[in-house]
Image: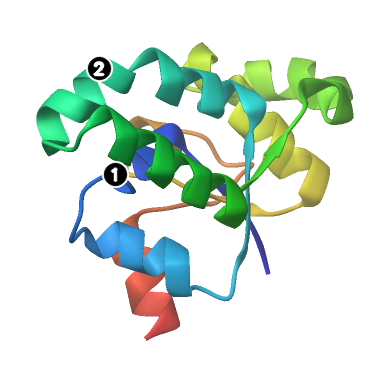
Amino acid sequence: MKCVVDTNILFSFFWENSLTKKLLITTNLELMSPEIALKEIKNYKNEIIKKTGISGINFINELKKLKLLIDFVKKKSYDNFIKKSIKISPDKNDSEFFALCFKHSCFLWSNDRILKNQEKIKVLSTKEIIEIMF
């Protein structure tokens, strides 16, 4: 089953004993995210390092592992769904995530509750993912 992963979930990957990290590693879901999520992670590199306590080298190594788990998709492959996603997205900054969901007819994994304020794309939290899988 395909799943688009929001950046807030991907940030959790950098916490050493994160349950979300374990789920990302062990899930049988086909995980993808817009390429913009990768840029966002890189933009918040210093904040991630500070909050998690990892070194710059560990950040780079964890990012390499994350890239093996997540298919970071180029915008041009889902660009024709952007207008549709802007119309439904409660947060316009997340419209690319919805566009990727539209393209693949799949759900969005996010802990951002505001994203549930629409009816076109199913949004599941980490807790809901766990309940479904186990």
The residue depicted at 52 percent of the width and 35 percent of the height is: 118
- Crowd class of label 1 (few under 14; some 14 to 19; many from 20; radius 10 Å): many
The residue depicted at 79 percent of the width and 49 percent of the height is: 104
Mark 2 falls on what kind of element? Answer: helix
Q: Nearer the viewer, residue 61 or 119?
A: 61
Position in image of residue 133 (x %, y %)? 43, 80
Marks 2 and 1 in Cβ contact (< 8 Å)? no
The residue depicted at 81 percent of the width and 41 percent of the height is: 103
Residue 11 in sight: yes
Position in image of residue 97 (x %, y %)? 60, 32
Please state which amino acid type lies under the numbered disc 2. Answer: Asn
Q: Which mark is residue 46?
A: 2
Q: Is residue 102 above or below residue 42?
A: below
User: Based on the displayed image, in which of its 4 quarters is residue 59 positioned?
Assistant: top left
Most extreme residue toward the bottom is 134
- Crowd class of label 2 (few under 14; some 14 to 19; many from 20; radius 10 Å): some
Q: Nearer the viewer, residue 134 or 67?
A: 67
The residue depicted at 53 percent of the width and 13 percent of the height is: 92
Q: Nearer the viewer, residue 7 or 133?
A: 7
Q: How many marks?
A: 2
Position in image of residue 72 (x %, y %)? 66, 38
Q: Is residue 11 left or right of residue 102?
A: left
User: How are the colours assigned in the image?
Assistant: rainbow
Position in image of residue 23 (x %, y %)? 38, 67
Q: Nearer the viewer, residue 129 or 116?
A: 129
Please state which amino acid type lies under the numbered disc 1. Answer: Phe
Query: Which residue position is annotated with label 1?
Result: 14
